[in-house]
Image (spheres, rainbow, N blue to C red):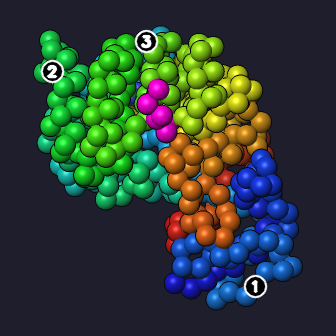
Amino acid sequence: MVSTLITNIGELVTNDPAAGGLGVVRDAALVMDGGTVAWTGPAAAAPAADESFDAAGRAVLPGFVDSHAHLVFAGERAEEFAARMSGEKYAAGGIRTTVERTRAASDDDLRANLRRLIGEMARQGTTTVECKSGYGLTVEQEERAVRIAAELADEVTYLGAHVVPAEYRDDAAAYARLAATDMLSACAPHARWVDVFCEEGAFDADQAREILQAGVKAGLSPRLHANQLTQGPAVRLAVELDAASADHCTFLSDADVDALASSRTVATLLPGVEFSTRQPYPDARRLLDAGATVALATDCNPGSCYSSSMAFCIAVAVRDMRMTPAEAVWAATAGGARALRRTDVGHLAPGARADVHVLDAPSHIHLAYRPGVPQTHAVWKAGRRVR
Ligand code: NIG
Ligand code: FE
């Protein structure tokens, strides 16, 4: 692989923890070599490389880390969205519509849809993607979903406990047991994470604990859909299990906020969901002021949020969740890496994966300042140009 020098960077966002905040370097350059960052610093001191790319004063960021997405599915639910916008409430049961479509799809159709969405994300600057199963809900179908996800996504999560499928309607406990035993055993070889939708209408805290603990025994690490629709016990369960992330965090008690703030569990906020379900936004300011670590992710899925845009999440988080532009950009890059317990992505320092996002703007602030405007100029993932 040839080395590449990106020069004339107006603002380089490094997320260097020693510098604090975004670790911005002005008039900077960056060299990537063999898939990793080899050098960063002032443009005037940059070493030579095989190729060079003139950023012409643009801002350069670490690629976005989208730490929460559901991308192995077939079909869509535009009519359900339209019904919500005329007053229907979002409910977990809508997931079953996508389960029917997904079960009927071929491997190649699922693969093609996943490739399409990961490509759509890359073209918008997302270079690390977490992908969950959860629209199969049989042993064979969940195994197929995590296996296909593992072909294309950076991080794979087993979410057999997404909702109780129709055929188990009268015996949810039996389905939870299946998710903690045979289904888990079939899926664990393809996944790194185990997740449960712990919510009214999905799985309760006891079921979630059992499935997550079984997942840990099978070598997986826990993360959790927590407090999306109600102020339930899921956030505290996530902290109790030292989950990498508690995702959604829309309805939080003071005890939930305190628990997150005194833990390693990241609060991953998914503002596209509140946008697309017309729910109140999570209170990012309250979490940040308490000392919790906050990440932003899309939750891209055909039901609660069919957006793959991290820039959109940033804009909403700044406008409606009282995050500063710098906090939101950090949450969409370093925060996502934290939520996935990854140290190689979400920042730009020598040794980091060369995931580089050149904005068509002079500053990271433009991501929130110019909402809805495509601002991705060029993208490298592990040193390979993807846009
Ligand atoms: O994270 N809440 C659970 N799962 C997804 C929604 C899935 C769907 O509606 O299809 C979420 O919002
Ligand atoms: Fe989700």
Identify the residue at horizontal 60%, vertical 38% (top origin). Answer: 295
Give the structural element (helix, strand or loop) at label 2.
helix
Specify whether residue 298 is painted magenta.
Answer: no
**Percent x, y for residue 129?**
46, 51
Task: Tell me if 77 is positioned left or right of 16 in this view.
Answer: left
| Figure quadrant, ligand 1 | top left
Q: What is the magenta range?
A: 240-245
For the stretch drawn in magenta, the main secondary structure is loop
Q: Please name whichever residue, 143 or 325, is drawn nearer the observer in this view of the structure.
A: 143
Q: Nearer the viewer, mark 3 or mark 2?
A: 2
In 3D space, how far apart are the residues under numbered discs 1 and 2 (Cα atoms)? 62 Å
* Three-letter amino acid code at the position of disc 2: Ala
Q: Please name whichever residue, 83 or 104, is drawn nearer the observer in this view of the structure.
A: 104
Say few, some or many: other residues with alpha carbon within 10 Å of mark 1 (under 14 / 14 to 19 / 20 or more): few
Q: Earlier in the sequence, mark 3 or mark 2?
A: 3
Q: Nearer the viewer, mark 1 or mark 2?
A: 2
Q: Earlier in the sequence, mark 1 or mark 2?
A: 1
Q: Earlier in the sequence, mark 3 or mark 1?
A: 1
* Three-letter amino acid code at the position of disc 3: Glu
* Three-letter amino acid code at the position of disc 1: Pro
**Percent x, y for residue 329?**
69, 45
**Quarter-wise, where is residue 99 in the image?**
top left
Give the structural element (helix, strand or loop) at label 3.
loop
Identify the residue at horizontal 62%, vertical 49% (top origin). Answer: 333
Q: Nearer the viewer, mark 3 or mark 1?
A: 1
**Percent x, y for residue 291?**
70, 30
In 3D space, how far apart are the residues under numbered discs 3 and 2 (Cα atoms)? 31 Å
Disc 1: which residue: 47
Q: Which mark is residue 174?
A: 2
In 3D space, how far apart are the residues under numbered discs 3 and 1 (Cα atoms)? 59 Å
